[in-house]
Amino acid sequence: MTGMTQNATPALIIFDGSPLQIEQITAIAHQRAKVQLSPDPAFRERIQRGADFLDRLLSEDGVVYGVTTGYGDSCTVEIPPELIPDLPHHLYAYHGCGAGRILTDVETRAVLACRLASLSRGLSGVSWALLKQLEHLITNDILPCIPAEGSVGASGDLTPLSYVAAVLCGERDVMWRGQIVPAAQALEQTGATPLRLRPKEGLALMNGTAVMTALACLAWQRADYVGRLACRITAANVVGIAGNAHHFDETLFAAKPHPGQQRAAARIRGDLVAEAPLRNSHRLQDRYSLRCAPHVIGVLEDALPFLRQLIEGELNSANDNPLIEPDQERVLHGGHFYGGHVALAMDTLKNTIANVADLLDRQLALLVDTRYSQGLPSNLSAAQGRTQAINHGLKALQISASAWTAEALKQTMPASVFSRSTECHNQDKVSMGTIAARDALRVLELTEQVIAAMLIAARQAVPLRERIQPDVPIGEEMRAWIADLAERIALVEVDRALDKDLQRLLADIRAQAWSLYVD
């Protein structure tokens, strides 16, 4: 596996069964990296040994779940030898019942990369041709149209992954070159031939956790950036409200040794000038949404390394069933398709992210209210003179931010506790990992909307404070960041619709337009 470089040329990520990181999956998803199966003959030979062992078992009348038997609760049904080649087709055919939105291009690329990563472990009994076909989809950006809903997260992401299996075989639709076209057309025009899946290959593709893991990788990276932005925005709000920079003192935070909390405090501290005298304030202590910001953001920061461990553990696993162990020549029937670790990671992530949204929403409530903003104009309006009375600044934006926050908080109910017994009680305890991952992405979407609102507020609050206190103390990096914001967003002096500003800022947030902190 080669590393990634931060230049205009996409990096090359080699899939050879060695560990991958979240950042590599997200780089593939955002087309900042290309994919290649390892050219090492030993890697290809290992893949082929698994397929050959399975062929030998079949020739010797071996019994293998999902190969010589039916699927799920139908595992007691013996498949006649002449029908075995048709069984994989039936698996992806009858699972073609997804609903809901179609996964985005970014999400779909991540799904393909996660499935390729798992199958490259060499424990799934698939052919080299199948891996090459997956590589072909990623290389040519042929993206299966995958409905987001229909997986309970155990027995894997069966229904959504059936759309990947079908596309490899030239069936169903794909997004290709900006249009929805039949899969067979995209394959033909890129020089590929539809596969006929070998025994076990339908299960190998579908009986895994690629969808939830892909969404989790994307969610993790977005969450990391949310934490960084929340620190910078908090620092701007401390400046705007003439708050107490000493709340982030290094000695103070040494007394409570949560590394993520200390990191958040250090980021905020670096953006402020703690030695400057306090102005316009009779409060020794700021309200909690400012004073305790590192304690809230720090929970997210301290969770991220643990969540990375859970997500990358799943990413680097063989997670279908049964596994085909080529070295010992064993068929191992188990339940690695169970997505409990991803479910926990995503349920945890959405909780910590929603709390950050709530923190920022409370900061905005202080900034717009003249009872608490310590001299700032009502609703952060920059209007001056006779028109002040008819301009309302960020009044409506604060209402919208509060609505987005409330919806994010409502989404934090853990999905993993809603296990349902399905499929004739064969799948009688399931993870709901994919639902948890979709929930986490929705919470992130709402939180990013809150952050976009807060960027507009920071753009208003700091220059408005400078009208009152021209020598307001600001760290150099934050001053440059405020200047950058000023180039992206005009000061709200006369009431105007802010929706287009919000959408531009959301695009900047999701593109991670600002380099924030070197921890």
Image (cartoon, helix red, strand yellow):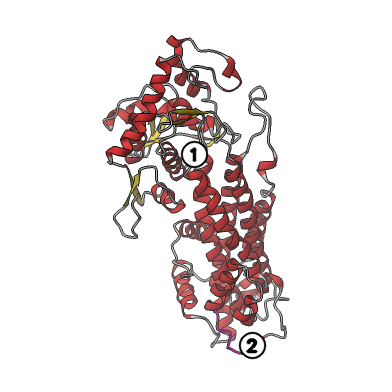
Comes first in the chain, label 2 or label 1: 1
Range shown magenta:
272-280
Amino acid type at image mark 2: Arg
Give the residue at x 36% y 33%. Answer: 47
- Residue 170 at least partly seen: no
SS class of the residue under badge 2? loop
Residue on which the image places disc 2: 279
The spot of residue 195 in percent (x, y) is: 35, 24
What crowding class fits label 2: few (fewer than 14 Cα within 10 Å), some (14-19), or many (20 or more)?
some
Seen from the viewer's position, the closer of residues 101 and 119 is: 119
Foreground: 413 or 18? 18
Image height of 40 relative to 60, above or below: below
Q: Is residue 183 visible?
A: yes
**Which corner quadrant of the image does residue 193 belong to?**
top left
Residue at x 57%, y 55% (from the top left corner): 306
Structural crowding at the residue carrying mark 1, measured as other residues with C-alpha within 10 Å and reported as few (<14), some (14–19) or many (≥20): many
Residue 121: % across, % down: 42, 39
Query: Residue 29, image x and y in percent?
Result: 41, 47
Q: Circle 1 sits on which residue?
A: 210
